[in-house]
Image: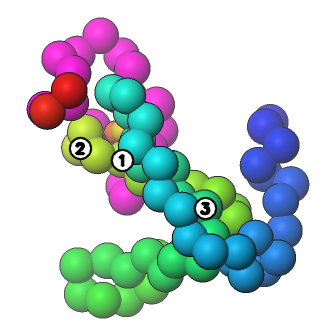
Amino acid sequence: MDSAQFENPRSARRAPARITVTPGGPLVVRGDVEIVDTLGDPVPRRRATVALCRCGRSAIQPYCDGSHAVGRSPIRGE
Ligand code: FES
């Protein structure tokens, strides 16, 4: 388990939002951002910091499951 699993989502969501692009990996989202699905319904978020998949390979969309790192071509634009 990493330390992010023990963060208090409520306290972290008060901070300004920050989205970090990781090389060849997900978008790491910190702060008060609501994530919604294609219908506009909220996507459950259990952590204050989450990683959003941008390669399309994750089995737990919209979140990253690490599949981007499994020997495939890099994410376009990198
Ligand atoms: S970015 Fe990690 S599985 Fe897609």
Residue at the far left: name it. Answer: 76
- Where residue 50 appears, as percent x and y from the top left, is 57, 56
Image mark for residue 45 = none
Q: Is residue 60 visible?
A: no
Image mark for residue 30 = 3
- Where residue 68 appears, as percent x and y from the top left, is 34, 28
The residue carrying mark 2 has its beta carbon less than 8 Å from ligand 1: yes
Label 1 with label 2: CB-CB less than 8 Å? yes
The secondary structure making up most of the magenta span is loop
Q: CA distance from mark 1 to mark 2?
A: 6 Å
Q: CA distance from mark 2 to mark 3?
A: 21 Å
Of residues 20 and 71, the one drawn nearer to the viewer in this rendering:
20
Looking at the rendered image, the disc whose residue lies closer to the viewer, 2 or 3, is 3
Q: Earlier in the sequence, mark 3 or mark 1?
A: 3
Query: Which residue sits at x=49%, y=81%?
Result: 34
Q: Which residue is mark 1?
A: 53
Chain part drawn in magenta: 57-76
- Where residue 41 appears, as percent x and y from the top left, is 37, 88
Quadrant containing ligand 1 reads top left
Image mark for residue 56 = 2
Disc 1 residue type?
Answer: Cys
Query: Which residue sits at x=62%, y=74%?
Result: 16
